[in-house]
Image: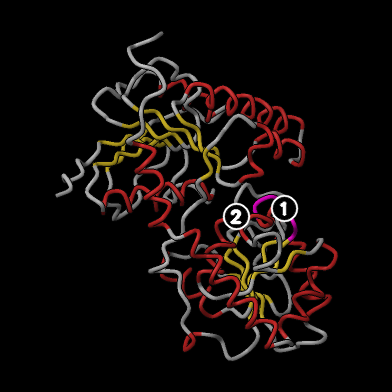
Amino acid sequence: MTAPTVPLRIAMISYYLPSGSKIGVGYQVHELATELTRRGHHVDVFSECPPVPGASYGHVQVHTGPRWRTFRFATALRRIDFSGYDVLHAHGDDYWLWRRRVPRHIRTIHGSCFEEALRIRGTGEKLRMLLLGFSEVLASLVADATVVVSPRTRHWTPWVRHVIPNGVDTRRFRRDDAAVAAEPTVLFVGTWHNRKRGAELARAFQRDVLPAVPNATLEMVCRDAPRDPGPGIRVLGRVDDDELAAAYQRAWAFCLPSEYEGFGIPYAEAMASGVPVVATPNVGARYVTDDGRAGVLAPLEEIGAKLRELLTDASWRERLRVAGSARAAAFDLAHVADAYEKLYRGRPRRSGAAA
């Protein structure tokens, strides 16, 4: 008879949470902490953001100042006593925690700040990203085990062995044929400005899609879009979990033409919901769509044309729906939690309280 598995006490570190930030890392931490708590583990999330309303896991708010906030957050973490936990799982900002504090220290790198530094605008922001990139390297040396969320994320940390993708709750993100919109609908989840390129998608939709498909709508889950972005576009703003799942179920296609994604959780959410994905060939989109075998990858200037073709070709949409749904099984949150549980119970790289 197999002995029962002993629940773990897990301290999870994330500057971001959905209660205070739209950054995808925070949403993934919330989902993973919720799943691990459901399995009987005790999870406390240490974050600068306030608690997520209704969260099943514990929360410890770590206050920082407005300038160089993530670096201040990392410094504040060094003063916290984690000795009561079995596992410290950091999703960022653990690079000062080199002294043994818990039996097992795991670090997840959700992308590459070096990659973002190549693309972000502004000298100050480039410098901040470069410093954070070096902090990712240092953190990968501090932890017992380091995880990347996609194979190509290893480019800047080639010594990292573990790949565990981000997870999607397939109980919530699932196909519902009865909910699909009667009129052609494209969904975008991201920001109007910067690397998510919502503004560029809106222009491509109005230029390339609307003349051929005048009844089409672009729905944008986007908090920084202008109040009136023009014909054919409906701004949903910020939505809750149920509203987001419903938006995916309405859509005929999903498009996120991001300049860079380390993974790209919305791609996986769309595929799990049975929605064909159109994306630019960034690192995350290439991985999630299996290099375009389970989605459409195209340069930014061709995105509008691809959406037009997809909306007018039902058989192509169905082929992509089937391929995307099959690929999304690899990103089921239950499988992701299984992989982390195995890693949590692994042998520490070193023992004692080394300084």
36 versus 73 height, above or below: below
Q: Which quadrant of the structure image shows residue 237?
A: bottom right
7 versus 272 height, above or below: above
What secondary structure do most residues of the magenta stretch adopt?
Answer: loop
* Mark number displayed over residue 282: 1
Identify which residue is drawn at 59% across, 62% down. 267
Is 270 situated left or right of 152 in this image? left
10 Å crowding of disc 1: few (<14), some (14-19), many (20+): many
Magenta segment, which residues?
Answer: 280-284
Is 339 situated left or right of 60 in this image? right
Identify which residue is drawn at 55% across, 56% down. 265
Residues under numbered marks 2 and 1 in contact, where contact means CB atoms less than 8 Å apart: yes
Q: Nearer the viewer, residue 303 or 47?
A: 303
- Amino acid at the residue labelled 2: Gly
Residue 350: percent from left, percent from top:
39, 18
| Label 2 SS | loop
Residue reaching furthest bottom?
182
Q: Nearer the viewer, residue 160 or 191?
A: 160
Identify which residue is drawn at 70% across, 82% down. 316
Residue 328: percent from left, percent from top:
53, 65
* Mark number displayed over residue 264: 2
Q: In the rendered structure, does residue 282 fall within the stretch colored magenta? A: yes
67 versus 224 height, above or below: above
